[in-house]
Amino acid sequence: MSAAKKKTKRTVKRVTGWRAIVRRLALIVLILMALPVPFILLFAVVQPPITSVMLQRVVARTANGERPIWPAHTPVSRRDLSPYLRRAVLASEDDRFYLHFGIDTVELNNALERRRRGGKLRGASTLTQQVAKNLFLWNGRSFVRKGVEAYIALLLELLLSKERILDLYLNLAEWGPNAFGAEAAARLHFSKSAANLTRDEAARLAAILPSPRRWSPRGSIATRRAATILFRMQYAAPKTEPPTPAKNRRSR
């Protein structure tokens, strides 16, 4: 066999080898993308007993010698959650919940604009994205994690109703040291069930969600934030875009 033919044969083998690797990588990516789907479909009817974030807390508490290592978490049905809490959480965390598809492009643009002006890049995560993170991902701010979070949020919006996503959030959110979900939060902070939370108590619980392990519902930060939340709770969370004023329509 001539040297040219041998070189061509090696080149063909090399190209074929790269194609096989690419195909395998593509298959792995497709499997990973499809992996959350059966779990999300299951969560449409079953409340998750534990989440990725809970497991991270268990590992951390075990490593630090803290007790108990297992989190307080008692899932409850929608009828056992105070309606005040549902509205308070929307007012605090995602008042455009019924307007977006899992990713709020309006708030994302606002966050990017604040960053452009020198502020911090924060405040753009939706409730759906937080559910995605709590269920499947890890704490952190990397672009990889945010990208995966956005993808899972889109799957949640596609496969679940808005009300179910809100139910999941209220039952899974971290609400204090080793306390997850509204029932555990109500018991920990107010010694009552989540169904019996008052309007003010609901606002105070919603107020600590950005930093539940450091803030207390009765603290000064929560008191200031709760006042704003209570004001916003006067109005129903929007389910459709508000009509454009006639003046604005004429100016377009």
Image: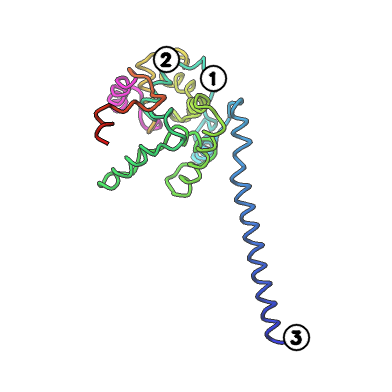
Region of the chain picked out in magenta, as a range = 212-233
Spatial distance from mark 3 to mark 2, Cα to Cα?
Answer: 85 Å
Q: Identify the residue at horizontal 45%, vertical 14% (top origin).
A: 192
Up-down: is 129 above or below 13?
Answer: above
Q: Which residue is mark 3?
A: 1
Spatial distance from mark 2 to mark 1, Cα to Cα?
Answer: 14 Å
Give the label, 3 or 1, closer to the camera: 3
Give the label, 3 or 2, closer to the camera: 3
Q: Is residue 227 magenta?
A: yes
Q: Which residue is mark 2?
A: 197
Crowdedness near tag 2: few (<14), some (14–19) or many (≥20) residues, C-alpha within 10 Å: many
Camera-side residue of 221 and 102: 102
Circle 2: element type? loop
Residue 72 visible within the image: no
Tell me where residue 95 appears, x and y as whole percent. 38, 27
Q: Which residue is mark 1?
A: 76
Q: Amino acid at mark 3?
A: Met
Up-down: is 145 above or below 209?
Answer: below
Tell me where residue 39 appears, x and y as whole percent. 61, 35
Question: Mark 3 vs mark 2: which is more N-terminal?
Answer: 3
Circle 1: element type? loop
Which quadrant of the view contains residue 99? top left
Circle 3: element type? loop
Q: Is residue 234 left or right of residue 154?
A: left
In the picture, the quarter occupied by the C terminus is top left
Q: Amino acid at mark 1?
A: Val
Question: Mark 3 vs mark 1: which is more N-terminal?
Answer: 3
Crowdedness near tag 1: few (<14), some (14–19) or many (≥20) residues, C-alpha within 10 Å: many
Number of numbered callouts drawn = 3
